[in-house]
Amino acid sequence: MGAVTTATFALRNSDKAMHGEGLRGGVAAAQFVNVTDMLRGGSGQVGQYAQSIFDSIDNVAQASLGVSNAATKLASFTSKAVNPLLCVASGMRVLKDEDKDKAFTEEVCAMGAMFGAEKIAKIARNAADNAIKTGSLDDIIKNPTIKNFGENLISKINGMSKGGKTALFIAAELLFVGISIAAFNNGKKLGQLLTGRSETGQTEKQAGKT
């Protein structure tokens, strides 16, 4: 995931933390650290500001704890902590629910759909990035008609201005966010249908008894 995707998720989790899901605050904090780490390698004021944050953390940690490169170590930890924290937050939702068995089924469906969709989206994104870099779809598509269409599209993308490429990159990042959210919501609905806790599920359950 890129900085735009991670920042969007961080803002979304911050909002959820302020509306009852306290553990999402930890997820948001981890994601904000990751965004800062991604941005600090860039040029311009944003990159310099992100680097200054890391430098400040390093200086404080070195002076007070004797730990060097603390910010980099923190970013390495938080990059691996996001998904486990999301799973913990999911578990807390189950524990707070009156019907824990049904809540567990719904959360498994929601989280499983989300992680599965994100994995597929990442594979597709990596394949697209490689195709754009090489300008070829030889390793991905064999059908000549589709392949020619795809390579013409890649050629147009490579010929875009810097601003156009930036806009396309942001669109791809936001698309990933949309896929993740849609997968979670649809997975949740599937779980509710299985447990009979949605309106549709209740209707079907009642119809089966008549």
Image (tube, grey):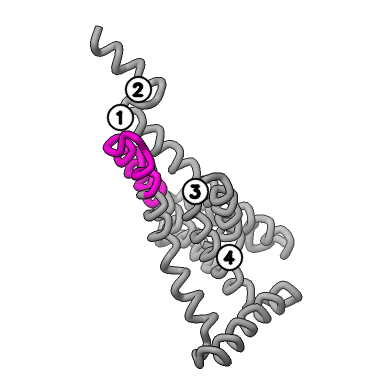
Label 3: element kind: loop
Q: Report how far apart the C-alphas of labels 1 and 2 lie in the structure.
A: 7 Å
Of marks 2 and 3, which one's residue comes earlier in the chain?
Answer: 3
Vertical comparison of 67 with 31: above or below: below
Tell me, yes or no, whether the two marked residues, 1 and 2, touch with CB atoms within 8 Å.
yes
Name the one closer to the observer, 103 or 179.
Answer: 103
Q: Which residue is mark 1?
A: 195
Q: Quadrant of residue 173?
A: bottom right
Most extreme residue toward the top is 210
Residue 90 visible in the picture: yes
Residue at image point 32% right, 17% down: 204
Vertical comparison of 142 with 206: above or below: below
Q: Which residue is mark 4?
A: 32
Give the label on residue 21, or none: 3
Residue at image point 52% right, 68% down: 134
Give the quarter of the figure containing the C terminus: top left
Kind of residue sitting beneath label 4: Phe
Magenta stretch encompasses residue 138: no
Q: Residues within 10 Å of mark 3 (few under 14, many from 20)?
A: some
Q: Position of residue 168 (x, y in %)?
A: 64, 55
Of marks 3 and 1, which one's residue comes earlier in the chain?
Answer: 3
Q: Is label 3 or label 1 in front? A: 3
Q: Which residue is mark 2?
A: 201
Q: Report how far apart the C-alphas of labels 2 and 3 lie in the structure.
A: 26 Å
Q: Is label 3 or label 4 in front? A: 3
